[in-house]
Image (spheres, coloured by chain):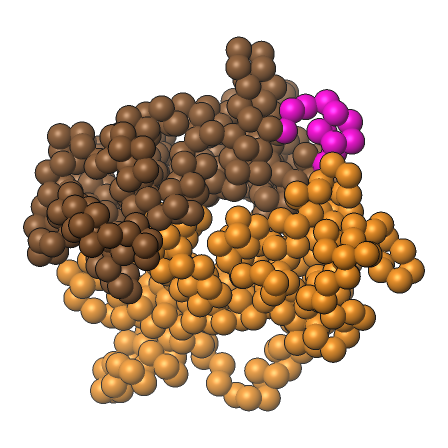
Amino acid sequence: MLAYAVQRIIVSILIIILAVTALFVMIQFVPGDPANVMLGPRATPELKEALRERLHLNDAFIVQVYYFFSGLMQGDLGVDLTSNRPVLGILIEQAPFTASLVASTLLVTLLGIPIGTYAAVHRDGFFDKASGVVSVSLIAVPPIVIGLYLILFFSVSLQLLPAIGAGEGFWEILLHLVLPTLAIGLTWIGYVSRLVRASMIEVLGQNHVKTARAFGIPNQRILRAYVLRVALPATITVLGVSIGFILSSAVIVEIVFSRPGIGKLMYDAVISRNYPVVMGTVLASTVFIVTATTISDLLNVMLDPRTKDEN
Amino acid sequence: MAKRTNKHTGLTRVRNVIRKLCSTPLGLFSVIIVTAFFVVGITGDWIAPYDPIKLDIRAKLQGPSSAHWLGTDQVGRDVFSRLLVGTKVASYLAVTAVSISLAIGIFLGMIAAFTSRWIDWSMLLIFDTVRSFPTLMFALAVIALFGPSINTIIGIIVISTFPSYARLVRTQVLSLRSMEYIEAQRAMGTRLPRILMRHIFPNVIGPVMIVASMDIPLVIGVEAGLSFLGLGVRPPTPSWGTILNDGFSFIRNTPWIVISAGLPLILTTVAFTTLGERLRDILDPKLRR
């Protein structure tokens, strides 16, 4: 177990280093002078030279990578080109908004467990069939469409829930989280319910469950004994994989709902070609995703050692 | 799994699969919508009742009527015509991006399975690195560098989807590699490329196609999302995402633009996912749950 964990963590660090280097290589391939691109065509030569000097653009590629990583080790992610503030500070300021959105999405996703279990127990019944169709639809439809329809229904027509901003004060913040969370989370409720249903059906057909039934142990008790053991690994796997998609959707959802956060920050940085901020957000989200998938992998191996061989 | 190279049985098999697909209401629904998606994608320009980019300010933001089935947008363009023509972008992207990604994924996956452990391992590391980027954030970074265009979107989709095909193919090939009929071919001295093309490829393509069908909603979603953000297809070219964005600005007073632009997105994404699920049930009953 320990050896596996160490190996898994080394691979994760390698992935993060590779990802950042890849981004650097991409910047090298940008057509034209990056200083030109960042400052626009009307910048004076002196301004461009100063920027080039500041971002080490005049140095060789390897030297630039060295500067970036050595800065990174000291917690220095560079400086925002427009506001001159350190990127790390901005990231820390925006992270809680995105983190709360991701956390509430993950929580909502757990709703898939009871839905999937009920569908599996009443297999081929009305609920099973209906939830199957609804789940597949929710899995398929892009979060942007779900988000817009939610706004139309709950904010524009019913005027029940706020659709703009992140709110202030505990109750307001919660209310402002509802629609964005559903916009991202409905998809994953669908996924988890399908997966839990599938694993439950598999387990319910196994010999030890049949034996337990034959001994006259009540259905309720059998379910209680197996539900979590079956549902947890499936759910953790899905959630581990989903973190990346949830963050992706967060970009769109934050913009649709005018919420502050990492996604909105990145979008604004892309529009204004603020490279240091783009780099910082990409790095932060990659680290976050790689950490999340690693943790979910390790948790899974702890819960079910057989999965070790599959990874 | 025995090899099937006989053309006649191949055709009968395809016909059987289509018959089974259409035998359930959901399967039939998905076949109809997917067919319509590609047909409208090709013919959209001709069947659209109005010019999708012609402005008519006097007719702006009208509700649905017999003249404009789905109303008009903020500069008086017919929303229905724009949706029909917008299908072109979605179907073009779905076909090109997924085919390129499939080709690269299958090629690299087969190589990874048949080379030395070290190359296999480093390829896996690269696949996992690429997969660890969230698609949309990766897309934003690439667009920040190279500017928005349809080719950029294709590139983004290819790069973010090929690793999962490659990984899938690799796993499939690894299990096929030790099969007796492949070992027999190798013992007889058949060259590797021939084994790969004649014996491995036909057995790998099925599962990969199923995943590809389920990935098309992702492609359509990425395009819609990026175009919605103004980072995909450039105006005035209609695409489902740009129409959603037009409607979003007027969502309080004229909600029908968002509603009608969302419908084709919902229909096609659900249809492709259902198609993939049905295909999996039919082609690979072992996976059925």
Using the image, determine if residue B80 lies above or below residue B95. Answer: above
The residue lying toward the viewer, choosing from B11 and B183, is B11
- The verdict on residue A154 being magenta is yes
The residue lying toward the viewer, choosing from A157 and A277, is A277
Q: Colour of chain B?
A: orange
Residue B16 position, x and y percent, is: 67, 75
Residue shown at 36% from the left, 60% from the top: B146
Task: Specify the quadrant that holds the N terminus of chain B.
Answer: bottom left
The residue lying toward the viewer, choosing from B127 and B84, is B84
Q: Quadrant of residue A71?
A: top left
Residue shown at 42% from the left, 47% from the top: A271
The magenta-colored residue range is A152-163
Residue shown at 55% from the left, 26% from the top: A165
Residue shown at 15% from the left, 43% from the top: A54
Using the image, determine if residue A113 lies above or below residue B231. Answer: above
Instruction: Tell which chain the image draws in brown.
Output: A
Q: Residue furthest right?
A: B66
Query: Do we see residue A220 in this rendering?
Result: yes
The residue lying toward the viewer, choosing from B269 and B28, is B269
In the displayed structure image, the side of residue B135 where residue A92 appears, left or right: left
- The verdict on residue A57 being magenta is no
In the displayed structure image, the side of residue A228 where residue A48 appears, left or right: left
Residue B167 position, x and y percent, is: 35, 59
Q: Quadrant of residue A5?
A: top left
Query: Do we see residue B37 in this rendering?
Result: no
Using the image, determine if residue B184 lies above or below residue A153. Answer: below
Residue B148 position, x and y percent, is: 45, 59
Residue A282 position, x and y percent, is: 32, 42
